[in-house]
Image: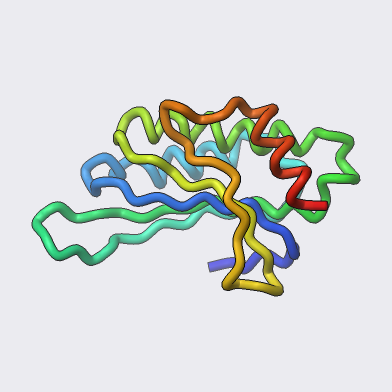
Amino acid sequence: MPVLTDEIVLNTDAFVPVDQAQSLRQRAHQLLASHPWTTKEIFYGDQAEPTDNDAPLWSFCFNLGLDHIRATKCRWRGDVEAIVNFLKDVAAKTGQEILLEIRYRSKPWHSQHIAYIDDECPDCDEICEMIERVAK
């Protein structure tokens, strides 16, 4: 699994039922291949999760390095929008909320909550404004 080198990283985190996740990896890789990212610091990961009941879960995440956002003259917002739109679709299909937060490489125990991707999710402009405030 590649490790991002950026200090500031946008992290998404969610659990979905395994039956919903069957095509998630393929769709995520299609997103990674089709979007013109403003950084090479982009990652998707997933794995099966152990559970105490008969309903298996699948966890997944996207990580987007944000150290470059000042240099892209706001083009990075298109990266965030691509990820958020993808996640809105996943959230709608699974009924699961998806956590969106800022993580710091130098402080792995610390995160800054941005939003939940669900039916009450803020729009992408508001999300990007929150990211800019936190990523100063």
Residue that appears at 60% across and 25% down: 123
From the top left corner, tell me how far across and down residue 31 is, in percent.
Answer: 54, 37
In the image, 85 versus 98, the foreground residue is 98
From the top left corner, tell me how far across and down residue 33 is, in percent.
Answer: 59, 40
- Seen in the picture, residue 51 relative to 30 is either above or below; the reply is below
From the top left corner, tell me how far across and down residue 75 is, in percent.
Answer: 80, 34
Picture quadrant of residue 92: top left
Picture quadrant of residue 81: top right
Can the viewer see residue 32 in this picture?
yes
From the top left corner, tell me how far across and down residue 62 is, in percent.
Answer: 54, 50
In the image, 92 versus 27, the foreground residue is 92
Residue that appears at 23% across and 66% down: 50
Is 118 left or right of 132, judged from the image as shown? left
Query: Number of labelled discs?
Result: 0
Is 97 left or right of 87, judged from the image as shown? left
Is 8 left or right of 17, judged from the image as shown? right
Which residue in the rendered view is the most extreme toward the left? 54
In the image, 2 versus 113, the foreground residue is 113
Can the viewer see residue 42 in this picture?
no
- Seen in the picture, residue 49 relative to 21 is either above or below; the reply is below
Is 98 left or right of 18, judged from the image as shown? right
